[in-house]
Image (cartoon, coloured by chain):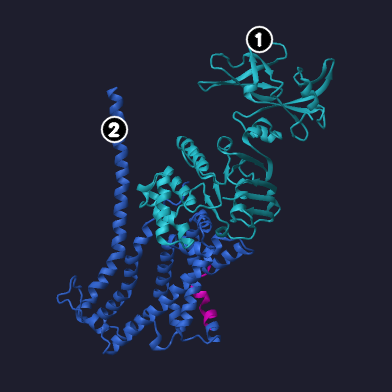
Chain colours: A blue, B cyan
């Protein structure tokens, strides 16, 4: 009896050790990934608080001798020309991204709901047609879209960018949201309609609140897409006062080749809205909102 | 409360007829069960009455109104879903209040009605909870409460008990039955469980393949099934159906088996057999109407035991007869072993005879 028990426990120990080995390999891998993503950002942050001279020193200063917020002050000061440019680019980016996000949610929510709930002629064809755009690299559409925008007189307007970003963002937004609506039991709407709601009320009062995580994910996705986009903004806009941040920062880089702290400060501030947006909204992702709705 | 009339109701999906010319009347205060196997059209019929699915043709009358084109919200109905469909983001209180809010009742009246419904269903202490914090049985109660809080003309229930465990199901069965008696409510209740239908309903509508097979009280459906489908669907264990052939023997008309034996018939049963369209006749017998003999008795038929299932207070014996499985129940003190030779005697008064061709029940006159 005792030998059997010993063999069994030894087997268990060996099994546990093997599992632990994998767990450690996973941790090391994650640590590596974390360093890989975080280090450049940390270096960006450190450089942004150096003086121009310290930034180009070799060997580099790991922590600046004289940390300074001068670059940030310069960028955020509406009095000098650099600050004026930066704030205008920032405002342009914010405007284009926000409008893109709002429009994309307004269009994607009903479209995804229709694809999820209704059967209509050409439904499958339309659904895949919507995705067709995303099967090609974005650059392929650069010239055709430019010609199109020129024809309808939208070159050098923010409208051209918003329209373009919508053609990129909407298909995936619709696809993503459709998945959410597919997972909301149709009986909830039916119950609401029997309880006295119209079909539209049932959608607004019952289904919409339950799809909040999907809508937020969609919004963040469109916002980030529009906020970071470079090549279309570079092609469609040529007037300085209309540029968005990615293009603006690139100009900044070529005009002020030596001002690394300024460049890094601008890059850092560009990433702030996205991070804030994500931190504020992330708690909505975590909760499974339909839990308890139906019994399977 | 109100009565419900379905008249020549048809629902087609493309070429598929899900509901086929169903006509029936549910009287005021009646509990009607729509029962049938999966895919028989019972849930579709309920959705047509609810207005969740548009009808193809026919008429639905609730109370005095033809409701064919009315939205669900205007039909004055309440529905309990199989999966309960509670609003997950709302508390139990708000779930119960929702139908009243949608009807724009004043706030204090809503409060009174919600609390009254919660008291009746014994869930006052659950009002502040979210559906996900409730057990299956409690969720079921909330779903029921949401239906009764509004005092609708008709209650529609779509298999409300089939997601509960066996013990809770029996308990809720009697609660719903009680609820019907107290409220004198008109209830249309869909189930695939014939036992639920038989025990709860005033009348049952047996459906198969989109057709209404029989619509009558459970006792009538049990005693006089109109065809072989109803006969085999209602009752547990199922009625044994034995395919035989009518032939003329010196003593009168008898039923003969391919196995060689023949069964004499009472004059009344002979009369029934003469109504058959062909010689093919199917003999139907419920387990309790067949007598099991250990030795050959006059009028009994030899068979071999296949399996024996003891339930404690009754033992079910299965035997093969003329290619069909025959269920017989015997008291537990009679010991029967598999492969044992037995003799079966059919009760002439309580046997059913069906036309082997049309599968319809044969009647004496």
Looking at the image, residue A130 sits to the left or right of residue A67; the answer is right
Q: Residue furthest left?
A: A65
Residue under the image location 41 percent in, 72 percent down: A223
Left or right of B39 on screen, residue B357: right
For the record, the magenta segment spans A135-146
- Please indicate, yes or no, whether residue A290 appears anywhere in the rendered image: no
Q: Which residue is mark 2?
A: A10
Q: Position of residue A204 (x, y in %)?
A: 47, 65
- The quadrant the C terminus of chain B occupies is top right
Q: Which is in the foreground here, disc 2 or disc 1? A: 1
Q: Residue at x 46, y 58 (%)?
A: B100
Q: Check the image and report above or below for A287 versus B334.
A: below
Label 2 in the same subunit as label 1: no
Callout 2: few (<14), some (14-19), or many (20+) C-alpha neighbours within 10 Å? few
Residue B281 visible (yes or no)? yes
**Quick one: B207 or A12, which is closer to the camera?**
B207
| Residue situated in front as seen by the camera: B55 or A94 | B55
Task: Give the residue number, with chain letter if any, for mark 1.
Answer: B295
Query: Residue A61: within the magenta?
Result: no
Q: Quadrant of residue B58?
A: bottom right
* Chain name for mark 1: B
Task: Name the chief secondary structure element in magenta.
Answer: helix
**A144 falls in the magenta region:** yes
As helix, strand or loop, the secondary structure at mark 2 comes to helix
Contact (Cβ within 8 Å) of mark 2 with mark 1: no
Q: Chain of mark 2?
A: A
Q: In the rendering, at what x and y percent does residue B42 appear?
A: 62, 46
């Amino acid at each position: 009896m005792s030998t059997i028990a010993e063999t069994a426990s030894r087997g268990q120990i060996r099994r546990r050790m093997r599992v632990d080995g994998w767990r450690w390999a996973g941790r090391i891998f994650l640590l590596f990934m974390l360093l890989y993503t975080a280090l450049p950002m940390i270096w960006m942050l450190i450089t942004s608080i150096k003086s121009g001279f310290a930034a180009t020193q070799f060997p580099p200063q790991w922590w600046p001798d004289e940390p300074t917020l001068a670059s940030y002050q310069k960028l955020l000061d509406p009095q000098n020309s650099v600050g004026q440019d930066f704030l205008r680019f920032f405002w342009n980016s914010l405007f284009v991204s926000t409008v893109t996000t709002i429009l994309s949610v307004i269009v994607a929510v009903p479209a995804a709901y229709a694809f999820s709930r209704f059967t209509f002629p050409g439904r499958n064809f339309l659904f895949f047609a919507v995705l067709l755009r995303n099967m090609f690299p974005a650059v392929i559409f650069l010239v055709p879209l430019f010609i199109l925008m020129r024809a309808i007189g939208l070159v050098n307007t923010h409208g051209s960018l918003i329209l373009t970003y919508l053609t990129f963002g909407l298909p995936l937004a619709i696809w993503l949201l459709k998945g959410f609506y597919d997972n909301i039991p149709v009986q909830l709407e039916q119950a609401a309609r029997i309880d006295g709601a119209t079909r539209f009320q049932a959608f607004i009062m019952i289904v919409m609140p339950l799809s909040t995580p999907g809508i937020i994910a969609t919004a963040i996705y469109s916002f980030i897409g529009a906020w970071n986009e470079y090549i279309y903004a570079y092609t469609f806009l040529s007037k300085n006062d209309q540029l968005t941040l990615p293009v603006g920062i690139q100009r900044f880089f070529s005009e002020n080749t030596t001002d690394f702290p300024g460049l890094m400060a601008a890059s850092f501030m560009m990433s702030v809205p996205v991070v804030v947006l994500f931190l504020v909204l992330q708690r909505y992702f975590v909760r499974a909102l339909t839990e308890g709705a139906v019994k399977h | 409360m109100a009565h419900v009339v379905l008249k020549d109701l048809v629902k087609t999906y493309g070429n598929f007829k899900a509901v086929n010319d169903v006509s029936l009347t549910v009287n005021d205060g009646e509990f009607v069960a729509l029962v049938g196997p999966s895919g028989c059209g019972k849930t579709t019929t309920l959705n047509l009455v609810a207005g969740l699915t548009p009808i193809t043709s026919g008429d639905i009358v609730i109370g005095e109104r033809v409701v064919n084109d009315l939205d669900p919200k205007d039909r004055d109905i309440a529905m309990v879903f199989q999966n309960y469909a509670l609003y997950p983001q709302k508390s139990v209180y708000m779930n119960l209040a929702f139908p009243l809010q949608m009807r724009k009742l004043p706030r204090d009246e809503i409060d009174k009605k919600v609390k009254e419904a919660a008291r009746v269903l014994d869930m006052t202490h659950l009002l502040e909870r979210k559906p996900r914090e409730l057990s299956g049985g409690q969720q079921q109660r909330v779903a029921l409460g949401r239906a009764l809080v509004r005092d609708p003309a008709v209650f529609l229930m779509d298999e409300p008990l089939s997601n509960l465990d066996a013990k809770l199901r029996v308990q809720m069965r009697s609660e719903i039955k009680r609820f019907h008696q107290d409220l004198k409510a008109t209830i249309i209740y869909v189930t695939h469980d014939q036992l639920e239908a038989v025990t709860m309903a005033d009348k049952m509508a047996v459906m198969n393949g989109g057709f209404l097979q029989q619509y009558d009280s459970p006792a009538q459906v049990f005693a006089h099934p109109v065809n072989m489908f109803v006969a085999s669907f209602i009752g547990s264990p199922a009625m044994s159906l034995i395919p035989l052939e009518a032939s003329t023997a010196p003593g009168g008309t008898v039923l003969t088996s391919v196995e060689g034996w023949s069964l004499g018939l009472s004059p009344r049963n002979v009369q029934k057999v003469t109504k058959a369209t062909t010689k093919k006749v199917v003999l139907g017998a419920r387990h309790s109407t067949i007598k099991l003999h250990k030795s050959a008795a006059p009028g009994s038929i030899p068979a071999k035991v296949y399996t024996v299932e003891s339930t404690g207070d009754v033992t079910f014996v299965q035997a093969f007869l003329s290619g069909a499985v025959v269920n017989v129940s015997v008291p537990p003190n009679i010991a029967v072993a598999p492969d044992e030779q037995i003799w079966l005697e059919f009760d002439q008064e309580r046997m059913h005879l069906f036309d082997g061709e049309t599968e319809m029940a044969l009647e004496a006159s």
